[in-house]
Amino acid sequence: MNNERSSKKYIQIADRIMEEIERGTWKEGEAIPTVRSLAEMYGVSPQTANKATTHLAGLGILASRQGSGSVVTGRKSFFSAPRIPMLIDKARSSYLRGESTAVGYHGKELYLHYLHQMKEEGIEPALIVYNKSDSILPEEAKILMDDSRGVLIQGTLPECYMKYLEQNDIPAVVINREIDEDFRGRIGAVIMNNSGLEQTAAYMASLGHEKFIYAFSDEFEMTSVYKSRLRVMKKSLQENCRAPETDLMEFTFTPGSGSDAIKLKEAIDSGYTGIICYNDICALRIYDLLHQQNTRIPEEASVCGFDDMFMAEMAAPPLTTVKVNRDQLISSSLELLKDLIGRKSPCALKKSSDTGLVIRRSCWQKPPR
């Protein structure tokens, strides 16, 4: 039996021992059968049975007592695994290395919520860093995924990872990404709902803006999330604007660029006075471009962001933005993972995470012409 299979086998035996504990076969304070007896009961080697009991001892479910073998402690962990890894791409992992940039700080927020939730659940956190170009699954990633009951995924996972999760029936939850319809394992997705963006579009239209800019800084990667938000905005603006046709310009810029500041000023002068940004960082970069051209916010242009990070409220003027509950994103992901663990493959589930508009002083009525 190779190492990969042995790793999975002892987790399976640990699960069966847990099932017996939950049935009341072995109660709190009672000793479970010896390792040799467990090996005979489950048809495995004593080494595999020993790994299973050691695994459960690491979770605090069993305790070793001299002369009594392993004793049930009474603690029960739903996940029954030492860790629930989060898979993140290499670019995102740079946010965890102490970057002092705004983008770096912004990127850490979700992972800090993940670490907090793991502590609350009594589960060891683990990060699996992948390259989007990976075509072969690293052995370290296999070991970590095998030694878990499920994984959380941030970003777009390479096909080799998805195939491994599918083939080994490891439950997975993707955060703010749509589910691959061809995936035949147990998968879930927690998606930020569109209510905040829809409220933003309705609010901007109510202020009389008729021409809009969708602003995106090139320091970010343009993913499916960008396109999804663009679709929502177009639809919502069309439903709420007085103009017969929605006029929404996509504006990709480089932070601090003088030439982009001039282009932005020209667009505003031609009537594009409602600026909706991909996120708060993009919005604060837009502030800088507007300041370069002495364009006043909100007197000459209204600006909205997305995320409601801590800098949004301290900006001058404070930024109108969409609030995202990242703690809810992680807690909803874990709830979905628990649900998937109790189901059979194939299975695809979705949950929604709330968003909502926070109105501050960066937006006002369309400037008179």
Image (cartoon, rainbow, N blue to C red):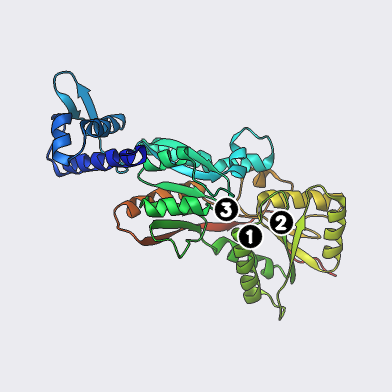
Measured Cα–Cα span from mark 3 to mark 2: 18 Å
Which residue is farthest front?
A: 1
Local crowd at mark 2 within 10 Å, few (<14), some, or many (≥20)?
many
Measured Cα–Cα span from mark 1 to mark 3: 17 Å
Compare residues 59 and 181 and report the one nearer the observer: 181
Secondary structure under tag 3 reads: strand
Secondary structure under tag 1 reads: helix
> Label 1, on which residue?
226
Which residue is farthest top?
A: 66
Residue type indicated by callout 3: Lys
Measured Cα–Cα span from mark 1 to mark 2: 9 Å
> Label 3, on which residue?
323
The quadrant the C terminus occupies is: bottom right
Pointer 1 with pointer 2, Cβ within 8 A? yes
Q: Position of residue 89 (x, y in %)?
A: 57, 45
> Label 2, on which residue?
216
Residue type indicated by callout 2: Phe
Q: Position of residue 66 (x, y in %)?
A: 17, 18
Local crowd at mark 1 within 10 Å, few (<14), some, or many (≥20)?
some
Please indicate, yes or no, whether residue 332 appears anywhere in the rendered image.
no
Please indicate, yes or no, whether residue 170 appears anywhere in the rendered image.
yes
Residue type indicated by callout 1: Tyr
The quadrant the N terminus occupies is: top left
User: Which mark is nearer the camera, 1 or 3?
Assistant: 1
Q: Earlier in the sequence, mark 1 or mark 3?
A: 1
